Image: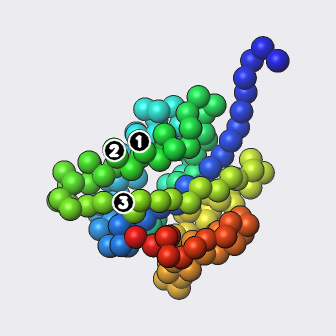
Amino acid sequence: MPQSLSNVLVHLVFSTKDRCPHLTPEIRHQLFPYLGGVMRNIKCPLLQVGGVEDPIHALFQLPRTVTLAQVVEEVKTGTSKWLKTKGAPGFAWQAGYGAFSVSARDADGAIRYIQSQEEHHRKTTFQEELRALMREAGIEIDERYVWD
């Protein structure tokens, strides 16, 4: 095939370091569009972003020329620098992240899930949520190394 085509959808999840509740509603209102700009700059179409005080969820299309690690580095670095200019001088994201493949058929469900984060986190902690996402994806985690 002379042309390379792909449609790889990724649900990315990561949190603030030590789950500090830095992401107030006012900050999120500005952060999410900024994150979208970071994604646009690396040619990663962002389908949905959401979250609450500490975790971020983003559904995006991974282009065939960019690695997942590059996307995460760009997003975390760019948003971290931006957040520090908004009055969070010691701000940091956790070191790791979770990334889950989403089929094109399931994209609408993932979008609804990300849009409902505020309601979801009224009854579920980030740790409980990440454990469930990992179980669904068939990923075993060693909790000694997951929470920072």
Kind of residue sitting beneath label 2: Gly
- Which mark is first along the chain, 3 or 1? 1
Q: Residue 20: horizontal and vertical position, in percent?
A: 32, 73
Q: CA distance from mark 1 to mark 3?
A: 12 Å
Residue type pointed to by label 3: Trp
Classify 10 Å Cα crowding around label 3: few (below 14), some (14-19), many (20 and above). many
Camera-nearest label, 2 or 3: 3
Distance Cα–Cα, label 2 vs label 1 = 6 Å
Q: Does the residue at mark 2 contact the one at mark 3 (Cβ under 8 Å)?
A: no
The correct choice, above or below, for 123 with respect to 85 in the image is below
Report if the CB atoms under discs 2 and 1 are less than 8 Å apart. Answer: yes
Q: Residue at x 56, y 38 (%)?
A: 67
Q: Which residue is mark 1?
A: 74
Q: Separation of disc 2 and disc 3 at Cα?
A: 11 Å
Residue located at (36% from left, 73% from top): 18
Q: Is residue 126 left or right of residue 65?
A: left
Q: Is residue 71 above or below residue 98?
A: above
Work out whether residue 138 can be spotted: yes
The quarter in which the N terminus is drawn is top right
Front one among 18 and 115: 18
- Circle 2 residue: 78
Question: Horizontally, is 25 left or right of 56 in the view?
Answer: left
**Which amino acid type is marked by label 1?**
Glu
Q: Where in the figure is residue 32, as x and y percent of width and height?
A: 40, 52
Alpha-carbon neighbours of circle 2 within 10 Å: few (<14), some, or many (≥20)? some
Say which residue appears at 43% left-offset and 45% top-offset. 73
The one nearer the camera, 29 or 132, is 132
Is there any visible trace of residue 129 in the rendered image?
no
